[in-house]
Amino acid sequence: QLQLVESGGGLVQAGDSLRLSCAAAGRTFEGYAMGWFRRAPGKEREFVANINRRGGTAYYADSVKGRFTISRDNAKNTLYLQMNDLKPEDTAVYYCAADETYGELSSRDYEYDYWGQGTQVIVSS
């Protein structure tokens, strides 16, 4: 079982930055592709970004491209999401997730096997 714990959320103003972290424990972190998803109030969970096992390939949702950066440190068993130029529409609970299946990176949440409990990000205008 892989345990994931997010941190780093908070209340910020539009234009500010935040860095989310996701600490993994229980299994070899490098064995998983990783992703960030978010759920805004009243909306379904949506894909934000994902990254392959070595950290060399990443994809982003159009809504965050150019503002957010996903990265991982396999030596520290940690996934990151650097969020710059935050907008009120980025307000959501952010979740990290792990995909144990080998293959192409997925933006579909049902293909991820392990999830963290989420961290709240609120961006005021």
Image: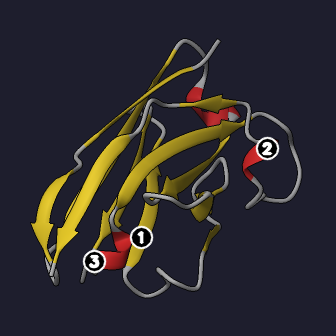
Residue drawn at x 65%, y 29% as measured from the top left: 114
* Cα separation between marks 1 and 2: 22 Å
Residue lying at the far front in this picture: please name it. Answer: 42
Q: Give whichever of discs 1 and 2 has the lower sequence position.
A: 1
- Quarter of the image containing the N terminus? top right
Q: In this view, does 109 lie above or below 62?
A: above
Q: In this view, does 87 lie above or below 72?
A: below
Viewer-proximal residue, 111 or 104?
111
Q: Which colour scheme is used?
A: secondary structure
- For badge 3, the amino acid type reads Pro
Residue drawn at x 61%, y 61% as measured from the top left: 46
Query: Which of the two discs, 1 and 2, sits closer to the camera?
Result: 2
Mark 2 crowdedness (10 Å alpha carbons): few <14, some 14-19, many ≥20: few
Q: Do the CB atoms of the residues marked 1 and 3 lie less than 8 Å apart?
A: no
> Would you name the residue on which mark 2 appears?
110
Q: Give whichever of discs 1 and 3 has the lower sequence position.
A: 1
Badge 3 marks a residue whose secondary structure is helix
Residue drawn at x 47%, y 80% as measured from the top left: 64
Q: How many marks?
A: 3
* Cα separation between marks 3 and 2: 27 Å
- For badge 1, the amino acid type reads Thr
